[in-house]
Amino acid sequence: MKWPVVILWLASAAFVAAAETNAPPAVAAQIERGRYLVECVSLCGDCHSPRDDQGRFDRAHWLEGELVHFKPDQPMPFAAIAPPIAGLPGYTDAAALRFLETGTNSAGKLAMMPMPQFRFNPEDARAIVAYLRSIKH
């Protein structure tokens, strides 16, 4: 009997997102799905967002890039820097979708460690792109 509650919550979240973004409900639902995938599934903020002195995310600079502050399990010949992904600067939608669906960049190279090589389905990849494009600072 939990499904009606979950469906009601998702519908209300989509409605609130649509009201806040003035986006049509279908677009708002896609953005909300992308937000969920970025924040709760792939945890992009762990590397791509700065933190304050208490270790909390600095939401004013959410997904604007950051030095990676954990010790990798393999030696790295460079400092790991997670680039900004809010707004997807430097990415076309096609390049971002390819990266999210195949784990490869526009040159056909795999993501460098410690970035996971995601394999999102096309619908989820489009939702992530919609969410990242919606972030404005």
Image (cartoon, grey):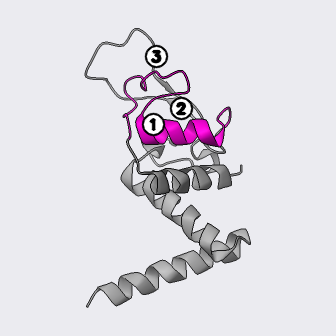
Which element carries disc 3, helix, strand or loop?
loop
Residue picked out by circle 3: 79
Q: Is residue 22 left or right of residue 39?
A: right
Q: Is residue 134 left or right of residue 30?
A: right
Residue at point 46%, 78% (across, down):
10
Residue picked out by circle 1: 47
Mark 1 is on which residue type? Cys
- Kindly indicate whether the residue at mark 2 contacts the one at mark 1 (C-beta within 8 angstroms): yes
Where, quadrant-wise, is the N terminus in this rendering?
bottom left
Q: CA distance from mark 3 to mark 1?
A: 13 Å
Q: Residue furthest top?
A: 77
Q: Earlier in the sequence, mark 3 or mark 2?
A: 2
For the residue carrying disc 1, how many other residues have a C-alpha within 10 Å: few (<14), some (14-19), or many (20+)? many
Residue at point 64%, 35% (across, down):
91
Residue picked out by circle 2: 66
Q: Earlier in the sequence, mark 1 or mark 2?
A: 1
**Most foreground residue, 109 or 79:** 109
**Most foreground residue, 96 or 21:** 96
Q: Residue furthest right?
A: 22
Mark 2 is on which residue type? Glu
For the residue carrying disc 2, how many other residues have a C-alpha within 10 Å: few (<14), some (14-19), or many (20+)? many
Q: CA distance from mark 1 to mark 2?
A: 7 Å
Q: Is residue 111 above or below residue 9?
A: above
Residue at point 40%, 56% (across, down):
40
Q: Is residue 80 above or below residue 101?
A: above
Q: Which residues are magenta?
A: 89-118
- Kindly indicate whether the residue at mark 1 contacts the one at mark 3 (C-beta within 8 angstroms): no
